[in-house]
Amino acid sequence: APDCPGITTSGPDFTGVFINDAGALGIKTAATFRLQSGKPSFSAATFGFQEETEVVAALQSLASSGLAVNAFSFGGYHHKVFTNRPPPSTEAARALAKTIMKQAGNPVRGALRLAAMSRPGGAGFLNKYPWSLTIICEGFDNRTAGAKCRRAKKILRHHGGRALPPTLGYALLAEPFQPIASLINGLGGECSVPTNCTVPPSAAQGVIADLDKFFADHGDTMQKHGLFTARLHLLYGSMFGVEPLIYWPDALSPLRLSVSDSAEQDALAQLPANPEARNIALQLRKSLVSEVFAKHRAGHAQIGKYYPLQDALATPGSWGMLQRFKTSVDPNGVMNPGGLGLT
């Protein structure tokens, strides 16, 4: 590696080729991170919306403003997921409160955040709105983070949002890694598969319109076999992201069953296999990529396995060069065989 990482004026820096290679080109044994001195401060807010188009428009405006370090929206289905979760144990609640107090920076601000989050009925307020949008703003100190959040709130109000308790934002700051069961299993034990894409904010409304049409065109088949969808949106830096999820009734795999709530595992283990619905779900996922995402030349967060890297490259020559490089660094093909679609 060069003595000054990131400075390559003296020639090409081939170390960058190992970034996002899905492990197909080598095994990383060390990493160097540029750290920021001092502890950043955060401010969060959640707004409710009646229309998905309003949420998307708000995210488009946020993307150009640069105010939010994180912004993500959920629909009615995920609102039910949040409100149906059992309350945390006393020990877990204390740990969460301790983390929130620490992140707040001082006792008064921490107490105010806890008071704003502690509402009767938990997160039930989300169910009053078909859509919600949560933002997290960052600054070198609480004053800067708060000022950014206030400006971002004006954007959300301009697009029709109504202020809600900031429970989601501060909870996710304190516990960013959510239970995997709620991500891969439905409320009724359904299986699910995600898809995702990123596009410039200017293309966001077009992607949403095409997703609506896609699922409407397949609505009869989905209804017949018990399939349904849910959707969330977010910002990847200055890019707009959307993640449609497809759910279908089926027997749970050992992994899905193992991460399920222990009190429900016996009942979930009795769910019958449904290969027909499963095949339809997987075909819909494949069609989403080829018919909707490809139309908008979308990027993907997990390209190289399900999302075809070869099709995303500009020219056939680019793929050939990548294959030759793979052969030179991994002549026996032992580094994650199939990663990025390489052999």
Image: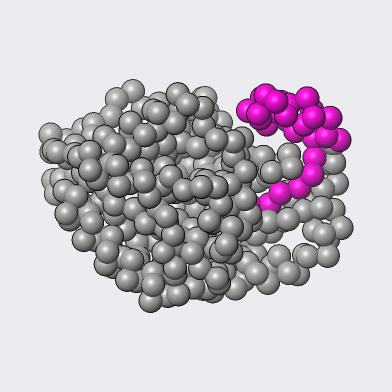
Evaluate whether residue 203 shows in this view. Answer: no
Which residue is painted at 62% across and 43% down in the image? 84
Magenta residue check for 191 = no
The x, y position of residue 48, in whole percent, is 49, 64
Instruction: Please name the colour scheme applied to the rendered image.
Output: one colour
Give the number of marks.
0
Q: Nearer the viewer, residue 202 or 306?
A: 202
206 relative to 123, above or below: below
Which corner quadrant holds the N terminus? top left
Which residue is painted at 42% across and 55% down in the image? 165
**Residue 152: quarter of image:** bottom left
The x, y position of residue 195, in whole percent, is 59, 52
- From which residue to which does the magenta span run? 245-272
Relative side of 189 to 119, left or right = right
Relative side of 275 to 114, left or right = right
Relative side of 56 to 44, left or right = right
Q: Nearer the viewer, residue 203 or 41?
A: 41
Relative side of 28 to 262, left or right = left
The x, y position of residue 111, in whole percent, is 29, 42
Which residue is painted at 44% across and 68% down in the image? 162
The x, y position of residue 157, in whole percent, is 39, 72
Evaluate whether residue 322 shows in this view. Answer: yes
Which corner quadrant holds the C terminus? top right
Magenta residue check for 250 = yes
Which residue is painted at 78% across and 65% down in the image? 219
**Residue 286: quarter of image:** bottom right
216 relative to 227, above or below: below
